[in-house]
Amino acid sequence: MPGSELYETFMALHTRDGGLVMPNAWDGLSALVLADAGFEAVATSSAAIAATLGRPDGRHEVTREEHLAHARLLGSLTGLPVNGDFEDGYGDTPEDVAVTVEAAVASGLAGIGVEDTSGDPAVPIRDFDEAVRRVRSAVAASKGRIVVTGRTDNFIQGRSDLDDTVRRLTAFAEVGADVVYAPFPPDLDALVAIVTAVAPTPVNVLVSPSDKVLTVAELQQAGVKRISLGPSLYTHAMGAAEEAAKALLTGDLASATTGMNFARVGELLARSKN
């Protein structure tokens, strides 16, 4: 599917009534599980990818090329639009971000996120003007071929300044970001303030506000247009693996070997779009 057509298809999921739930896969089989369940788009998770490789998230420990190859795998197996969780756009400059966007388009991605993070623990959030320049560069490079999400990580990094968060997201929307995103606003009131400030630009939410996990219907009622899960499905699966390991250590083979059987794995693999 050409970039512009893929862009229109993916954006239509955001602008329709109710928007979309876009779960994050971490490998080929998890992507196929999500596709088989009926989801219409999937995303990568930089945290989940990094964890599968035994690396930390957020400091380019997973290279751009590794992330692109991962995203291509998810798309080729499922045939679904894939949104890439690409940290800070993989580069120190706005021009570097543009290169990443071009590479994502060439890899067939439907969407890409650009954060205002720096990868520097001492100064984890880039200053306002630099953050806006980077999103503007991503939008210019996208040329209507890939959905650009402008993201601020203020809340994740312990910066509880709602006014600055709204200012950043509003600016990202003004320079052309198709979607905006601030993971874990403190509560529903803060989320509604964000949705109202940037309207009609679609807002993504990671699971819910920090204080309470809401239902999909409650988030939609608040005006959210896209719900992603980040590494939550991956950590859910790893939690099950951890419990199985504990059972195995006590000698409980039956509890340690429940779950999806390999016939189901084969069935899912046979349905791949490769």
Image (cartoon, helix red, strand yellow):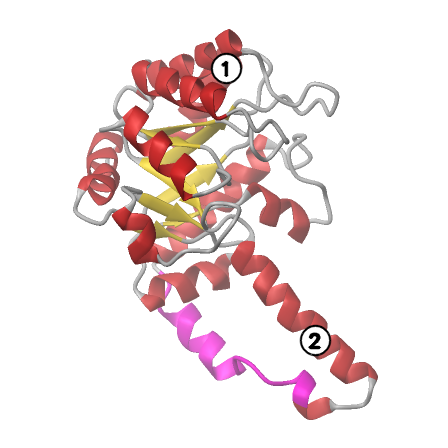
Visible in this render: residue 108?
no
> Residue at label 2?
243
Could you say which disc has been placed on residue 84 in the image? Answer: none
| Residue at position x 52%, y 59% in the image | 233
Q: Main secondary structure of the magenta part?
A: helix
For this orientation, the residue located farthest to the front is 189
- Residue 248 at x, y percent in the picture: 77, 83
Q: Quadrant of the N terminus?
A: top left
SS class of the residue under badge 1? helix
| Residue at position x 39%, y 13% in the image | 136
> Residue at label 1?
131
Q: Which residue type carries mark 2?
A: Glu
Q: Is residue 87 magenta?
A: no
- Residue 259 at x, y percent in the picture: 55, 81
From the viewer's perspective, is residue 239 above or below residue 60?
Answer: below
Q: In this picture, which residue range is highlighted in magenta?
A: 255-272
Q: Which residue is nearer to you in this view: 76 or 180?
A: 180
